[in-house]
Every structure is written in C-alpha cells, then in structure tokens.
C-alpha cells in the first residue's frame, strides 16, 4: 500500500502534503498544544519523543478538522509512532522493554 | 414498548419467563438521543430504516468472525503473512468482512518476545467490523487510563502474567486505525481443525487481555 515514487522520466511532482513528510525510523516529538474542542492526541503524548515505526496508508482527512465539517484539502498521513513506556511515564514500574504504539496525524509531529 | 397489562394470548407457550418490562425512566442522554434522532428523521437526513439497518450491520459482527480470522492465520502461513501486511484487505478478500466505518486494520502478532494489548484512551475505538461491539469495561475510564500507564497491572487483574523479558506493547487507537491481536497458538493444538482452533479464540484474547488456553475438556485430541 506504500505510495511508490514515480519514475524520474515522468517528472511527476506530488502536491504539497500528498507524500508523507516523515519516514520509518525518524525521531519525532509530539507537539505541545492544548487546543480547545475536538482533538485526537491524548494528553500524555505532549512533548514526548518517539520514533516513526510506519507511515499509515492511505492518507486520510484530518479527523480534528472533519469534526467541524472542514475537510477539503486536509488529507495527510497518520504515522504509527513507537514510544518506550519510560519516556511516557518516568516512574513506570513494568519491564524497561515495554512500549506503546499510537497513530498520530502529521500536523502534530515535529522533527527532533 | 412498555406492557402494563398482559392481555394478549400465548398460543405457543405458557409463561416460562417473567414479563419483560422497561421500568427505568429514560436518562437525560436517552431523551437527547431520541430527540435528535426524531429531528434528523423529520428533516429527512436519514430514515428510521437506515438506523435499523445499521444496528443489523453491527449485530452481524461478533467475536466469532475475528476468531475465524485468527484460526485461519494459525493454519495458513500465506494468509498470516497477508493479514500482518494489511489486516483490512486480508479480511475483505478472504472473509468478505467489510469495513463500513472506513478504518484500517493493523493485526498485532503476539510472539515469544512481544505481548500486544489494545486500548482507546480517547473514547472507544475498537475493531467493530471484525469483533462487533466492545465490552463495557473497554469503554470505561479505568481501563482506558490504566492500560497505557500500567498495562502489566491491568493484565494481572485479568489473570494474565507476562514475564519481564517479554515486551508488553500497548497500541492506543486514536483515529482511523483499528487493531486486532493475533494471539499465540496454544501448545497441544497441532491436530486441531480450523473450526476447533477458532473455538479457542475469545474476544478478550483478541484485545490482548488474556491468552487463549486449552480448556480441560477441549484437549480431547492430545
């Protein structure tokens, strides 16, 4: 399901936001925003640093915009992001191997 | 639908059960739902039959569907590979399971190194196309908050102990991805048929709060 890059000879330019900005392996931070209203990023993720595990295909409308009936042109990618539990919960008492995976929309992700 | 008097004939049976009554008063949200539903129908945004139809869609999805998917993955390595690569298309192509809610499905494979658990901290996202409606505890705040912050304690309360050298990996569903746990096939089931294997797979095993077990009675083949 991954979008294939067009052969160079065709000179096809993808539109802004059409291709995923991040790729598997990228280290990323979740934005520290507290919007009023509908959002899809749990609070415990704010400012936390994780690693992109996979790009979720296909691109999808921004659920936060869609909640207000606005979705034209807001199609972007979700990313499956991996966090160690100790990054999320400093006093985590389970095994240090434990981790969390979550899908986060592109507009919430910052490059570290 | 309240029957206050019981005056109709029972030709086929004679009262083995108590009369079914709705005695509780509707709550604030019950009334809100009725009011909005009636308004939307009145404005012709949808029809009553569409609501009935959607309930029918939901009722047709049960954990038995998911159990069939899991059992197939246990016996068919090729299907397992496709299921892990893209859960949605594998379910669509091999079982005709439609994803009416336009969600993607990631199937999470339990191994000797990783135990998966699913949750939706924000609300009640759940692989409804494959499993039907979630259990009540899945939608309540204690599970939603604790599954991400102290998963091993939550698992222990379900009677599941995961060794420390096995990673507990929690997947929190927030938007358009749903998860289904592919549990480990229990030992001692080598001679089981696909149907017998499916009988071992419970809803809770596909959420990841328990591991499928061989009940005493089902080990007849061994």
Image (cartoon, grey):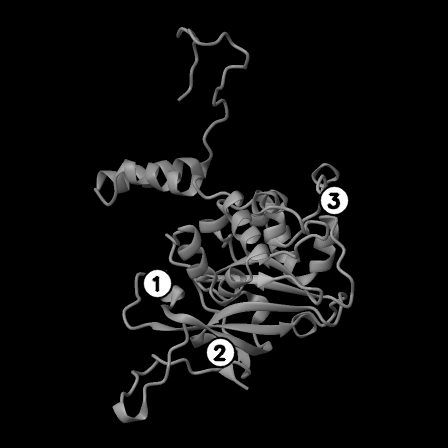
Give how far across and how far down residue B89 sits, in percent: 42, 61
Q: Which mark is residue A109?
A: 2
Counting from the top left corner in percent of width and height, residue A17 is at 35, 80
Q: Are marks 3 and 2 on the same chain?
A: no
Q: Is residue B136 in view?
A: yes
Q: Between residues B90 and A51, which one lies in front from this camera angle? A: B90
Residue neighbourhood size for the residue with mark 2, other residues' Cα within 10 Å, grouped as few (<14), some (14–19), many (≥20)? many
Distance, label 3 to label 2, CA atoms, is 52 Å
Asked if both marks, 2 and 1, belong to the same chain, the answer given is yes
Q: Are marks 3 and 2 in contact (CB under 8 Å)?
A: no
Identify the image quadrant of the C terminus of chain B.
Answer: top right
Chain of the residue that carries numbered disc 2 in the rendered image: A
Which chain letter matches label 3? B
Left or right of B114 in this view: B86: left
Q: Residues within 10 Å of mark 1 (few under 14, many from 20)?
A: few
Q: Which element carries disc 3, helix, strand or loop? A: loop
Q: Residues within 10 Å of mark 3 (few under 14, many from 20)?
A: few
Asked whether the viewer can see residue B119, the reply is no
Q: Is residue B80 above or below residue A86?
A: above
Q: Residue furthest left?
A: B44
Q: Split into 4 quadrants, where in the image is the N terminus of chain B?
A: top left
Q: Is residue B100 above or below residue A111?
A: above
Q: Is residue B170 left or right of residue A108?
A: right
Q: Residue placed farthest to the bottom in the image?
A: A9
Say which of marks 3 and 2 sits in front: 3
Q: Is residue A13 left or right of residue B169?
A: left
Question: Mark 1 belongs to which subunit?
Answer: A
Residue A66, which numbered label?
1
The residue that mark 3 highlights is B222
Q: Identify the element where label 1 is drawn.
A: helix
The percent position of residue B137, horizontal first and vertical second, equals 60, 45
């Amino acid at each position: 399901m991954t979008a294939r890059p067009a052969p160079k000879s065709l000179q096809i330019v993808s539109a802004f936001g059409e291709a995923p900005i991040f790729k598997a392996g990228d280290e990323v931070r979740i934005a520290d925003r507290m919007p009023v209203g509908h959002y899809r990023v749990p609070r415990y993720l704010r400012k936390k640093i994780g690693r992109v595990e996979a790009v979720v295909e296909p691109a999808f409308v921004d659920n936060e915009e869609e909640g207000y009936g606005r979705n034209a042109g807001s199609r972007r990618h979700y990313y499956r992001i991996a966090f160690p539990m100790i990054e999320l919960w400093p006093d985590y008492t389970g095994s240090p191997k434990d981790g969390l995976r979550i899908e986060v929309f592109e507009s919430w992700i910052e490059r570290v | 639908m309240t029957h206050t008097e019981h005056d109709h004939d029972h030709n086929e049976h004679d009262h083995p059960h108590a009369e079914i009554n709705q005695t509780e008063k509707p709550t604030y949200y019950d009334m809100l739902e009725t009011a909005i539903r009636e308004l939307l129908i009145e404005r012709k945004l949808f029809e009553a039959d569409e609501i009935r139809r959607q309930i029918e869609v939901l009722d047709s999805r049960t954990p038995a569907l998911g159990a069939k998917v899991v059992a197939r993955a246990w016996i068919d390595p090729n299907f397992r590979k496709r299921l892990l690569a893209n859960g949605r298309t594998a379910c669509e192509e091999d079982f005709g399971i439609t994803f009416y809610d336009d969600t993607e499905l990631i199937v999470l494979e339990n191994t000797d190194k990783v135990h998966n658990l699913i949750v939706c901290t924000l609300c009640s996202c759940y692989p409804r196309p494959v499993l039907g409606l979630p259990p009540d505890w899945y939608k309540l705040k204690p599970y939603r908050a604790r599954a991400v912050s102290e998963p091993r304690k939550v698992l222990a309360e379900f009677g599941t102990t995961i060794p420390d050298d096995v990673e507990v990996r929690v997947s929190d569903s927030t938007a358009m991805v749903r998860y289904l746990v592919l549990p480990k096939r229990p030992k001692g089931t080598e001679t089981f048929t696909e149907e017998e294997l499916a009988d071992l797979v419970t809803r809770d095993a596909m959420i990841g709060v328990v591991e499928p077990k061989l009940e005493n009675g089902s080990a007849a083949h061994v």
